[in-house]
Each structure stands twice: as structure tokens, then as C-alpha cells.
Image: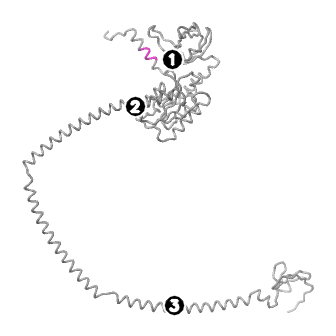
Amino acid sequence: MNSKAFTVSEISKYISTLLKRDPMLINVFVEGEVSNFKKSSGNIYFSLKDEEASIKCIIFRNMEISKTLQLSDGDKISLRASVITYEKGGYYQLLVKEVINTGIGDIYRQYELLKEKFKELGYFDESHKRQITKMPKNIGVVTSPNGAAIRDIITTIRRRFPIVNIYIYPAIVQGQNAPKSLINGIEVLNSYEFIDFIVIGRGGGSFEDLNCFNDEELLLKIFNSKKPIISAVGHEVDNMLSDFVSDLRAATPTAAAELCTPNLVDLKENLNKKLNLIEKAYSNYFIEERKKLDYYFSLIKVYNPLDKICKLKEENQKLNLRIDRQVKLNIIKERDRLEKFSIYLMEHNPIQRIELTKDELNNIKKIIKIKTFAKLNQERLKLKELQTRVELHNDLRIKKLGYIRATSKGAYINSAKSLKVGELLELHFEDGIATTEVRSIENGK
């Protein structure tokens, strides 16, 4: 066989790398019975078993859970863990992140159900992931304003890329009100067009503390966000559903700050390298151009253009003389033409015709004025005649002469035949109305 043999440590490291890259094994939920529980040098060791198998579990002393966890052999529990290897011993074990009593295991089952649902909908697919701009100008951050996460993000960004602007939305990142607060933060930062992308997350904690980042409404808001979103929740071993739905997952808030910003020192180095390349390119370019100029100068010496220039000067002088003569001739012609036109205008002066037209217009105005006054007088006479007629038929004038009008129920009485004995009539005088009764009716002509 020609293939190189692995050492024991090499194969152990290779297996460990494979396990760390498997997304399913870095955050698994396991149920079983506790056995061989013990503490040693602050670390916690125990086995988790069922009827057919057993697996070793470990909790390191620097993990928060190690300070408060109390278990006994025979306890039935659910736990969240990552599958890791113990390279020196050549076996795998569970690095326990959270331990949950079986009575409260629904939160993890809900996590798995929601994870499976979003996976089937394609929300985890790479095709939905958007690129994070490499040279951001404005970064939005949704996290607690008092936690270590925001300090780590600001410190890292200011160290790497101090020219970028950071816009922080102070959110609640733990408890029942956290999902709504995180959703509001995403909506607010999405409303600003100048924001390049959003970082959402918090520092480490228990699974229950981080569970707000598994909220279904929050996951939908992250997936449908107008701005790309980087999820940075907990530590490297923590994997919330926001990590899978977002456009980019960062192991920690510090890692998020490093992922979303370039290193200004590296940029300066690259810029200097490119400037050096440009300077070399321009230097080579000028060298080549100088060679061309030298070549053209040698050609000029061979093909001296001074003779041709002298000939062109002579031709130019002759041409100028011809132009001057032609211009003078044109001026003389135009002057003659203007003089002839001036004589013509004098002979056909329109001023006299204008004066005659003015006299005719004045006569017409006088005739119109006379006819207009005559017509007005005629119309005034007609109007006066009409006023006289109207006055003769004026009801008030007739009443002043002693005549009255008789009405019955508002209608004028024009005939005695329309009346009845006993009927009441209204008599309209000039200065008032009187009421009378019909006593008798005589038929007469």
C-alpha cells in the first residue's frame, strides 16, 4: 500500500473535526437515566443510559451549569449537548450545556418541532442567505445596552474598522417580553435606508435564557427582514434557531463584529501594495512613452517640417490679401444697394397716406357718435312710454283712486256668479285689508 498511515493522534483529531462540523451533533437533545454521577476538580462526570446503550457526559468547571447542577444516580433527565471526542482516550462523549428535568422537557421538544418545521419550509437553505457587505458604513445592532455583548461588539468594531457608524437598538434579550422587543428592534433598524445590515444577539446563558431567540414570530421577522441579519447568540456551542434563519451565523458577539467588518490595518496594507503596483505600472508606462518620444524626435530631425511651414505661411498671407480685397468689394456693393433702397423709400414715403387715413377715421368716428346718440334718445323715449304704461296698471295706483280688490281664500273674485251667500271675502284697500260677508247676490249685466 502506497497511502500514508495516520498516527493515532491524527486520526483522533480528524474525527473530532468531523463531529464539530456536523450541525446536528453540535446541538442535540438526549433523554436518559443518570448513572455514575461525580464531581472531580470542579468538573462533573456522569453517564446517560437507557435500556440498550450508555454514553459518557462531561460538564467543565468553567461552565455556569457546573456551579448549580445537582443530580443523583437514577434521575431521569433531558439534556442539551454537543457530541465531542476525548482525543487522548479515543472515545466520544457529550459536552452538556443544559440539564432539564423530564417534567419541563417540552421546551426542547418545541425547539426540535419548530426547527424541523422551518427546515422543511426551506428557511435554512443557503439560497435564501444574502451577502453581508464587506465595507459597511452603518451597522445596526439589536441587543441589551448593558450586557457584555454590546461592549464586545463596539470594542471589536472600533479596533478593526473605526470609521463605521454603529446604531444600537436597546432590546430585552431574556424573558417573555424579549421576542417582541427584538422584533421591534429589527423593524426600527429596517426603517432606516442607510443601515447596511443588522447584528442581533446576546452573550451566553442557559438554554432558557437564550430561548427567546427560538420564538417563531422573531424567526419569521429575521427571515423576512429587508436588511441582511447576522445572528450572534451565546457561545460557540450554543445554536439557537435564529442562527439557522439569519443570513450569517456568528459563534459569539465578538465573532459577529469580526465577521462583519474588515480589519483597517489589513486594508491599509492591501492599499499600500496596490499603490506600489500602480506606481510600478506608471513608471513602466512613462519609460515606454519616453522611448516613443525619443523615436519621434529622431523622425522630426530626419523629416524637418520647417520648409513646409514657411510655404504655408506664404500661402496664408496671399489668402489674407484676397480675403481683404473681397471684403472691401462686398462692402462697396452693400453700400450701393442701401443707397438705392433709401431713394426708393423716399419716393414711396407712406406718411402722406397715413395722414389721409387718419382724417377718414376721424370722420367715421363723428358719424358713429351722432348715430349712437340718436339711437340712445330713441330708446329712452321707448323706455319712458313703457314706464307710463306700467304705472297705469300699477295696483297701488288703482287702490289710491278708491278701487279695491276682493279675494276669497286667496283667489281674486272676477265674477258675482262665483260667490255664495254667507261667503267671507277679503277686501284689499291701499292701507289695509277688511273682511266682509256676502248677504245677497243680484244677477245683473
The secondary element bearing badge 1 is classed as strand
Disc 3: which residue = 369
Disc 1: which residue = 82
Quarter holding the N terminus is top left
Q: CA distance from mark 3 to mark 2?
A: 96 Å
Up/down of 192 relative to 242, above or below: below
Name the image quarter holding residue 68: top right
Tell me the crowding category of disc 2: few under 14, some 14 to 19, or many 20 or more residues within 10 angstroms, Cα based: some
Task: Give the residue drawn at x 58%, y 8%.
Answer: 35
Tell me the crowding category of disc 1: few under 14, some 14 to 19, or many 20 or more residues within 10 angstroms, Cα based: many
| Majority secondary structure of magenta residues | helix
Task: Give the residue drawn at x 59%, y 92%.
Answer: 377
Q: Which residues are magenta?
A: 14-19
Query: Callout 2, which amino acid?
Result: Pro
Q: Position of residue 246 (x, y in %)?
A: 49, 30
Task: Say which of marks 1 and 3 sits in front.
Answer: 3
Q: Would you say residue 18 sits in the magenta stretch?
A: yes
Q: Would you say residue 442 sits in the magenta stretch?
A: no
Left or right, residue 162 beside residue 111: left
Up/down of 1 relative to 335, above or below: above
